[in-house]
Structure formats: structure tokens, C-alpha cells
Amino acid sequence: MDIFSILLIIAGLCLFETITSIDNAIINAEVLSTMSQKARRWFLIWGLLFAVFVIRGALPWLIVWMSTPSLGPIGALTATFSGDPAVVAAIGQSAPILLIAGGIFLVFLFFHWLFLEEKAFGLRGERYIATKGVWFFAIVSILLATIVWLALGKNPMMAFGAVIGSTAFFIVHGFRQNAEEQERKMISGDISDVSKIFYLEIIDATFSIDGVLGAFAFTMAVPLIIIGNGIGALIVREITVRNVDSIKKYRYLKNGAMYSIFCLGIIMILDSFGFDIPSFVSPIITFGVVGYFLYMSIRAGPPAEAA
């Protein structure tokens, strides 16, 4: 892997982590505004270290290690930079299972946003699709059944990986729904700062899963994922402290995040079935999709409440 490819991958990971964590930054800022200065400072220092080094650092490493136990903890960290044929073979055997699980998770996440979540309508057809929310469950069920059927003919463990991806989506979605309810209580109610800090750490962990799983569409190299996602997490914390209101003015950034999630999910699924997709495709698609919706946001101007 040459230096240009490494830098492109890290830049793509950084952008993807940042754009998918905008909602997280907004929630953090709203809850932090109700906390004391001491508690706020504690979260922004120690919470940042936890988010970068524990969640975005340990999670991709654990995922690779669990999907390929034979590598061991050190091998899971350095596997993609190893020239050992046995290590290369082990990664090649387990990668499709990991990729199909992550791909299913991301595609489900996109369809949930498209059919069921409130949004600024950026593309033609989004408003109509939002009126057909009940179809979300039919579409993801048919999609999962189709992919599992195709995977069974290639590798039964891939089929199991697809089911794991859908299971992870519904578990994480349940946590997020509960977090939204807790956020309203925390902003309006009399809850201790310690409880709010625990809440913010939990919601940060759930939001980080999108970025961590999507990162495998860019690379299987854990060190690069840690660097790219870590820089993205630092940017999100800076947004939390200084620029949330500015970010809200770009009404279609969330759309860009979700369409890039969909593209990366498709890439991961195709890759799991053996399609040869160059490493530069994911970063370029991410920059292109996010850049297009950023342009749309600038051209449209801020929404009324942010103007």
C-alpha cells in the first residue's frame, strides 16, 4: 500500500466519521448546555479519550480479532500489513463474513432513515418515500432473505454474518430510540451531571458503531481505522464545543451522510461476494456524495430555524 493510498483512506475515514457523527455532536452540545462547567470540562477531556482510544480504537480491533481468532490480539492489529501467507489467508477467509455483516447494518440504517426518520428532503422522491414508512420492514426483510439465500450458496458463515448485521442494527436502533427519550428528560428535568455523563458516553458508543463498521469499506487495516476515526472524533468534539449552530445551517449534510452510508454498505456487500473493488473507490465516493450535498446545502441556504 503506497503513501498516497494510505493518506486517501485516512482522509476518507476522517470525513466519514465526522459526517456520520453530526447528530451525536448536536445531542452532546444540547445536553452539555444543561451541565455545570466542571462536569462539562470533565466530559470533554476524559470523554474524548474514551471515545477515541476505547470505542474507536478498541472496537475495530476487537471486531477483526473476533472474526479471525486464530490471528491473536497482536495479529489482528497488524494483519493487513503482514506478508505472512498464513495471515493473509486467514484475513481472506474471515473478511467476507465481516464485510457482509457491516454492509447489511449500513444498508438497513440507510433505509430506516429514508422511510421512517424526519429529514430535510434533498432529492426528488424522498418526500413520497417518507409517506410509505411501513414498507421499510418489507424491504429490509426481503433484502435480508435474498442476501442470505445468495450467501448460503457461497459460504454458510456469510449468511450467518448477514443475520448478525441485521441483529446489530435492531439492537443499536433500540438503544438510540431510548436515548432520544432520555435526552428530552435530561434537558427538561432535574438529573445529576453524573447521570448525564454516563448517558453521553453510552450514546457516543452507539453512534460510533456506524463509523467503525463503515470503516471496513475503506480498509481492513486496523491502525488506519484508528487514525482516521480518531481524527474524526476529535473534529466532532470541536464541533460540539464551538460550531454546532454553524453545522445546523447545512441542512443536507445528514442526507450526504446517509447516502454515503448506503454506498459504503453496497460496496461491503459486493466485496464480500468477491467483487474486486479498488481501495480508492470508497474514499472518492464519500468525498463526492458529501461534497454534492454540501453544495446543495450552501445553495439552499440555512433552514428557517437556523437562519
Image: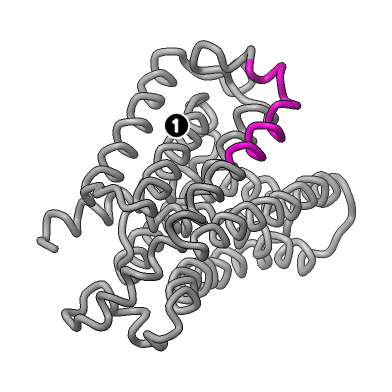
Hey, which quadrant is residue 300 in on the image? top left
Q: Residue 117: where, in percent of width, then height?
A: 68, 31
16 to 203, vertically: above or below: above
Q: Nearer the viewer, residue 108 or 247?
A: 108
> Does the magenta segment cover residue 131?
yes
- SS of the residue under disc 1: helix
49 to 179, vertically: above or below: below
Hey, which quadrant is residue 119 in on the image? top right
Q: Principal SS element in the magenta part?
A: helix
Q: How many marks?
A: 1
Does residue 45 show up? Answer: no
Residue found at x 65% / y 46%: 27
Q: Residue furthest front?
A: 153
Q: Residue 142: where, in percent of width, then height?
A: 63, 37
Label 1, on which residue?
256
Q: Nearer the viewer, residue 23 or 208?
A: 208
Q: Is residue 109 left or right of residue 71?
A: right
Residue found at x 64% / y 32%: 139
284 to 114, vertically: above or below: below
Kind of residue indicated by mark 1: Gly
Q: Residue 239: where, in percent of width, then height?
A: 48, 47
Magenta region: 129-143
